[in-house]
Image (cartoon, grey):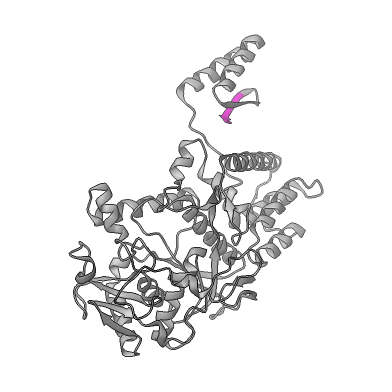
């Protein structure tokens, strides 16, 4: 498998540090609000990656953090703690906010058919590990204390900013060291790029979430949690670290600095970043107010898997522009694909086994697409080619689709169910009765009435079948 490594700015062959096993760390949600569909696009990309790795025979140890403390409204140490902000907004405790939005995150994960990570460590459960890591940095001479806070001194690390220090190739964004310094004035910083490892009361007052530390009662900076928790569960050197492209310039740059400052060696081998989901030329962000949740999509009649299909249509490294028209097209395409596979299922219903292993040109091409920097649009296109290929037997098509769907995660061979309102069900019953009496005029009128209510009407095995348009 060849993957584009942000750190080296080139595609590289994946060479696991431990044979047959991949250590994968993914930056998870800050649970002060619902995840928006831009966040979910990144989580989907990471799910496609994990599934592709497992499809290729690797055992994947995936760790994703839950940020429930320490993430300020600016990634660069300014503003209010996001958890405190959420608590004030909803007049709840920070602990209530954390539970509510952690539960909401997992509901989205399950609806999108994202495989759960091996572990979801919470920041608040790992304060001891963060303090130990800061002490290690202190011992190695990378820290200083000012205004009651502990800072990482980036001038002590010769290769600080190496992740963001040169332009990306092709569709990747050009980032420079100037972008790393997205900070407002902090008089305690000896250099604008320095960042906080531990905040004390002197900076943020008497917040609900605080812990005792060698530097005073307070709470950790955002960046330190990922380093501490990844090292605990994946070791001092692991294979892949993922996240959104917006993490490159600050969060991931600072993660590398503090981790390698503590370890004195390379921390992560390969860095992968998913690009933005945009709406009208703007990235989707909670701070800008232009964000949509998965529930909003559901309220408009879309299934979570419609959005999964929508995201499959663009490479993870490319910007993807969201529109309702585009999502509707994805919904229609997924339904058409499932209809084709449903017919294949009917053709194979007399066979005893429907899960036999198969090898053909499509499966080989599918594997090659995954190996080419996770080319999911090409992988999806191959499914369409397969189901329309008259030279492949129905049994072979079905077993191949089932193999492909282990990565796509679209539940292609599962029957789609819909909640049909009682009023529509009564019209369906009336139409079935009319058809049984061969009252075609009444049958057609009832069909038109059902269609006018927003449903597709089909006649299957002598009965009326309806589904939302």
Residue toward you, 66 or 220: 220
The residue segment tinted magenta is: 464-469
Quarter assignment of residue 189:
bottom left
Please tell me whether the stretch drawn in magenta is mainly helix, strand or loop. strand
Q: Which quarter of the rendered picture does the N terminus lie within?
A: bottom right
The answer to which quarter of the image holds residue 98 is bottom left
Residue at the spot x=59%, y=56% of the render?
Answer: 319
Say left or right for 313 vs 162.
Answer: right
Residue 105: image x %, image y %?
A: 40, 53
Q: Is residue 396 above or below residue 298?
A: below
Q: Residue furthest right?
A: 391
Relative to residue 314, is residue 134 depicted above or below? below
Residue drawn 43% across and 80% down?
257
The quadrant of the rendering that contains the C terminus is top right
What residue is at 48 percent from the left and 52 percent from the top? Answer: 284
Decide if residue 113 is on the left or right side of residue 213. Answer: right
Q: Nearer the viewer, residue 348 or 2?
A: 2
x%, y% of residue 240?
52, 73
Above or below: residue 412 compared with residue 358: above
Give x and y (percent) for residue 360. Answer: 76, 59
Is 103 a magenta residue?
A: no
Q: Is residue 233 above or below residue 449?
A: below
Is residue 293 something that shows in the picture? yes
x, y percentage for residue 186? 32, 72
Query: Is residue 24 something that shows in the picture?
Result: no
Number of marks in the rendered image? 0
Position of residue 255 in the picture relative to residue 90 (left or right): right
């Amino acid at each position: 498998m060849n993957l584009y490594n942000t750190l080296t700015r080139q595609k590289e062959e994946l060479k696991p540090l431990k044979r047959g096993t991949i250590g994968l760390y993914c930056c998870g949600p800050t649970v002060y609000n619902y995840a928006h569909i831009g966040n979910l696009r990144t989580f989907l990309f990471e799910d496609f990656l994990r599934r592709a790795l497992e499809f290729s025979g690797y055992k994947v140890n995936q760790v994703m953090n839950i940020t429930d403390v320490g993430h300020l409204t600016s990634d660069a140490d300014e503003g209010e703690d996001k958890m405190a902000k959420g608590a004030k907004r909803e007049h709840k405790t920070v602990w209530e906010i954390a539970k509510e939005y952690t539960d909401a995150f997992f509901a989205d994960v399950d609806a999108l058919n994202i495989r759960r990570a091996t572990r979801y460590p919470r920041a608040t459960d790992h304060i001891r590990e963060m303090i130990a890591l800061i002490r290690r940095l202190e011992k190695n001479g990378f820290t200083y204390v000012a205004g009651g806070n502990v800072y990482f001194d980036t001038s002590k690390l010769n290769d600080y900013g190496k992740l963001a220090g040169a332009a990306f190739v092709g569709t990747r964004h050009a980032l420079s060291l100037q972008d790393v310094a997205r900070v407002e004035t902090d008089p305690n910083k000896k250099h604008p790029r320095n960042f906080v490892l531990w905040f004390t009361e002197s900076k943020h007052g008497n917040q609900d979430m605080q812990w005792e530390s060698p530097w005073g009662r307070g709470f950790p900076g955002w960046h330190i949690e990922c380093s501490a928790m990844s090292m605990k569960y994946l070791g001092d050197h692991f294979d892949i670290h993922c996240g959104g492209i917006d993490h490159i310039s600050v969060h991931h740059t600072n993660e590398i600095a503090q981790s390698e400052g503590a370890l004195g060696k390379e921390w992560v081998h390969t860095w992968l970043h998913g690009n933005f989901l945009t709406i009208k030329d703007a990235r989707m962000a909670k701070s800008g107010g232009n964000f949509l949740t998965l529930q909003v999509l559901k309220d408009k009649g879309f299934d979570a898997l419609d959005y999964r299909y929508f995201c499959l249509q663009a490479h993870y490294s490319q910007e993807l522009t969201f529109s309702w028209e585009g999502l509707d097209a994805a919904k229609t395409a997924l339904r058409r694909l499932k209809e084709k596979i449903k017919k294949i299922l009917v053709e194979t219903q007399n066979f005893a086994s429907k899960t036999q292993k198969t090898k053909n040109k499509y499966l080989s091409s599918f594997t090659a697409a995954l190996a080419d920097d996770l080319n999911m649009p090409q992988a999806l296109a191959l499914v369409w080619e397969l189901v329309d290929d008259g030279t492949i037997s129905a049994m072979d098509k079905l077993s191949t689709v089932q193999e492909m769907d282990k990565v796509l995660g679209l539940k292609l061979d599962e029957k789609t169910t819909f909640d049909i309102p009682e009023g529509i069900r009564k019209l369906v019953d009336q139409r079935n009765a009319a058809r049984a009496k061969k009252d075609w005029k009444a049958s057609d009128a009832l069909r038109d009435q059902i269609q006018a209510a927003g449903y597709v009407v089909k006649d299957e095995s002598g009965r009326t079948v309806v589904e939302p348009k």
